[in-house]
Image (cartoon, rainbow, N blue to C red):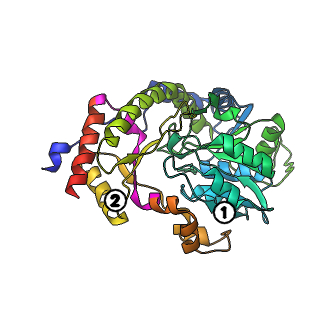
Amino acid sequence: MTLDEWAVRDLPAWPQYDDAERTALLRALEQGQWWRVAGNEVDAFEEEFAAYHGAARAIAVTNGTHALELGLELLGVGPGSQVIVPAFTFISTSLAVQRRGAVAVPVDVDPETYCMDPTAAAAGVTSRTRAIMPVHMAGQVADMDALDKLAADSGAAIIQDAAHAHGATWRSRRIGELGSIAAFSFQNGKLMTAGEGGALLLSHEDEYHQAFLRHSCGRPPTDTRYLHRTTGSNYRMNEFSAAVLRAQLGRLDGQIDLREARAALLTELLAEIPGVRPQRRDDRCDRNPHYMLMFRLPGVSEERRNEIVRRLVAHGVPAFVAFRAIYRTESFWLKGAPDTTAEELAERCPNSEAINADTIWLHHRTMLGTEHQMRQIARAVAATLREV
Ligand SMILES: Cc1ncc(COP(=O)(O)O)c(C=O)c1O
């Protein structure tokens, strides 16, 4: 077999844009004021993003990592607090906790959905647990029924890391209707993007007021007298980003519908390949925006998985290795790590340890392709597994 025989060609590019983004950028430009304090775009985007997700309010910020930090700050997470995080996630989940001066406590994930395992989370709760931070991995909403119950029983707050979950629903409830703070990312690869950006969904007007102060160096919205009412930083989104995101939000529903259809087909095709186990859908997640299509190759070594990804990329498939388990990074141990070792955490988190080594993900632009391209991708995966 030559590489070309299995080549996947002409998948849609990402990010996508058209005259909606062009018009939006010009509109922001011609306002003559390019920061949120004097413009309209960030205010309008916050209203539209909150309404879309069924939340009372949204606050737009510089990126998803800052959204998590701001959300934790609103919950009072700081030195002395612990926050439960999944061991398998992108590093910002734990980094945000550690940047607040708190301790990130990794717990294992479910081996099929790759989301926080509620039983493992319960085992990680102590008298110092201030918050639990589930990640909606690849668009699959974490088990919010069990985690909300755990939060209610333990007195901890929930903060959803929804960086992958724009437009997702859980038992017909949108992310903003789940009753907890949720943090989003608009980084270049995300489901809607302005290159960088982030947002928090909030349930109360007072939370928005507090968030506004803290994301703007402690200043009230109309302050001209340097009245710094509280501590904070500058996490303000600029007007250009918000204008682009308003256009991107307008395209999201159509893209989710298409990805739902293509993900169903591609998942079915991949599941037929011996040795491939796609991420399982928990049916209570009745709308999954499919930020990634993930699949495991159980029993395959990390080296072989990495070689398979390299060959898939050569076949034209936008494939990537899974996130490294957070306790397998140097960053995790520098500040705010629990009093344990990577080896102990690996033993406590066997699913995260395995997923970290045997999992591959495909970028969501894949699922904006045609049915024919889904078949080509499945054939490329099958051929690559035979080759490597
Ligand atoms: C699960 C998760 N949380 C948080 C983030 C952080 O978002 P950002 O890159 O916008 O800071 C990401 C981003 O890639 C992510 O995947």
Residue visible at 32% across and 51% down in the picture: 275
Mark 1 crowdedness (10 Å alpha carbons): few <14, some 14-19, many ≥20: many
User: Which residue is identified by label 2?
Assistant: 305
Q: How many marks?
A: 2
Residue 339 x %, y %: 68, 74
Q: Is residue 88 above or below residue 266?
A: below
Mark 2 crowdedness (10 Å alpha carbons): few <14, some 14-19, many ≥20: many
Residue visible at 15% across and 44% down in the picture: 5
Residue 233 can be seen in this image: no
The answer to whether residue 128 is magenta is no
Residue visible at 39% across and 38% down in the picture: 365
User: Which residue is identified by label 1?
Assistant: 105
Amino acid tagged 1: Val
The C terminus lies in quadrant: bottom left
Q: Is residue 69 above or below residue 378?
A: below
Residue 255 x %, y %: 45, 28
Residue 99 x %, y %: 68, 62
**Highlighted magenta segment, given as a residue range:** 355-371
Residue visible at 77% across and 42% down in the picture: 212
Left or right of 300, for residue 24: right
Residue 292 x %, y %: 45, 43
Residue 28 can be seen in this image: yes
Q: Is residue 384 above or below residue 144?
A: below
Which quadrant of the view contains residue 128? bottom right
